[in-house]
Amino acid sequence: MEHYDLIVIGSGPAGRRAAIQAAKFGRSVLVVERGRRVGGVSVHTGTIPSKTLRETVLNLTGWRERGFYGRSYRVKQDISADDLMARLHKTLDHEVEVLEHQFARNKVDTIRGEARFVDTHVIEVLGEAGDVQAFKAARYVITVGTRPFRPDYVPFDGEFVVDSDEILELKELPRSIAVVGAGVIGVEYASIFSALDVHVTLVEPRNSMLDFLDKELVADFTHQLRDRGIALRFGAKVEKIEKHGPADCEITLEGGRCVRSNVILFAAGRMGATPSLNLDACGLEVDHRGRLRVDPVTFQTSVPHIYAAGDVIGFPSLASTSMEQGRIAACQALGEKAYDPPEYFPYGIYAVPEISTVGMTEEEIKERGIPYECGVARFRETSRGHIMGLETGMLKMIFSLKTRRLLGCHIVGEGRPNWCISARRS
């Protein structure tokens, strides 16, 4: 039985950063990945694919230029699913090659297979050919990520009723799509398909979406979605989902209202990918969504030598935050110096248009009773916005009147990384 200082289960953003950080401390590290290639959900079905799809859509449709040339403007008239997949596969191959090189350069061992705990310090890895190998480690970091939530009442078929992993395998672009769930994933795909001129209906049982964002930002974003023809069905609980035939699907909402579409994307939540880990053997428990509870500062679980990071511990479930969590978890697990997680992580939502936020929202500032003032810059009022042909988008900065400190910065619109500079100059 081979022994390691640290075993990382999962090679997504949190896992890769945890492993490489531990290797840089001179520790022996093993990464276990059950997928065909390293990278986890982020590389193969999550962050990288959806963001690549977004950029491909915006480039091929000429969406960014329509402010100048009109809504009928197209770079490519007939866009197919193959057009979208060509760039996607090239990008994924590159990401995997980079990651494999990083592991090799830092002398991180990797093994492909499904890990399960035998006891608190030993795991077994089941290979694709049925072979089983045992490994022992002083410390563990669990970064297995999540999988789509697939309730029994949804008739998934992988073609017309799909989850957020299967949406990347569509053989043809639909004329209409209904997206159930207005979380980050649902909003991103709804806006991407809208940019392809696919008719989109977004269904959300709550009366609002993206509640962790500043409400003024959400209001501006919601207006942009409605203005583009996306039908928003807020406060609408799903009673039934049916497939009547090829490209003929129907959602029945509470109250009797129906939504018909060619394709239904069910994106209402994700589950921790923990069932196969046999966590009972090491004394860990998960919540109703299969997620692990950790200390928010150290990322230590209830078992002292086992840590967890990334999507498997829940909100915010973003690649950028998962990377930092993985680094900190590795440092804490190995007894090395680690900085505390920032109070506010920056969030990026790659919808069309993009959303970025860091710091407190206006609502949080009001709750704390802090005297404040807001500064708002509309993209259409800046030279850069006019040059880009943008009619929408905004930058909002919130300052403390007492200390003059910046408390929060929130942006919605295209080309968001450059807007702080542009707004400051204007």
Image (spheres, rainbow, N blue to C red):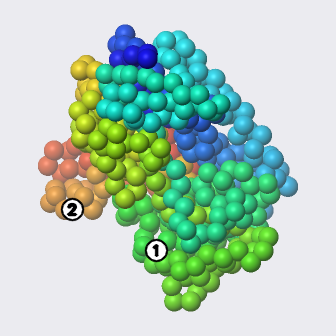
Tag count in the figure?
Answer: 2
Which mark is drawn over residue 86?
A: none
Which mark is first along the chain, 1 or 2?
A: 1
User: Can residue 162 be seen at all in this image of the molecule?
Assistant: yes
- Disc 1 residue type (three-letter): Pro
User: Residue 92's image quarter?
Assistant: top right
Establish if 11 lies above or below 255: above
Tag 1, which secondary structure?
A: loop
Residue drawn at (43%, 16%), measured in percent from left and top?
A: 2
Residue 188: give x, y in percent of width and height.
Answer: 56, 55
Residue drawn at (60%, 44%), measured in percent from left and top?
A: 45
Establish if 115 lies above or below 150: above
Reading the image, the residue beneath label 2 is 366
Residue 339: give x, y in percent of width and height.
Answer: 25, 27
Instruction: Give the farthest residue toward the bottom.
Output: 256
Q: Could you give the CA–CA distance between mark 2 and mark 1, rounded to whole angstroms?
A: 27 Å
Mark 2 surroundings within 10 Å by alpha-carbon count, few (fewer than 14), some (14 through 19), many (20 or more) = few
Residue drawn at (50%, 63%), measured in percent from left and top?
A: 268
* Disc 2 versus disc 1: nearer the observer: 1
Quarter of the picture containing the C terminus is: top left
Reading the image, the residue beneath label 1 is 205
In-image side of 126 versus 235 (left or right): right
Residue drawn at (47%, 44%), measured in percent from left and top?
A: 276
- Disc 2 residue type (three-letter): Lys
Residue 292: give x, y in percent of width and height.
Answer: 34, 46
User: Residue 380's image quarter?
Assistant: bottom right
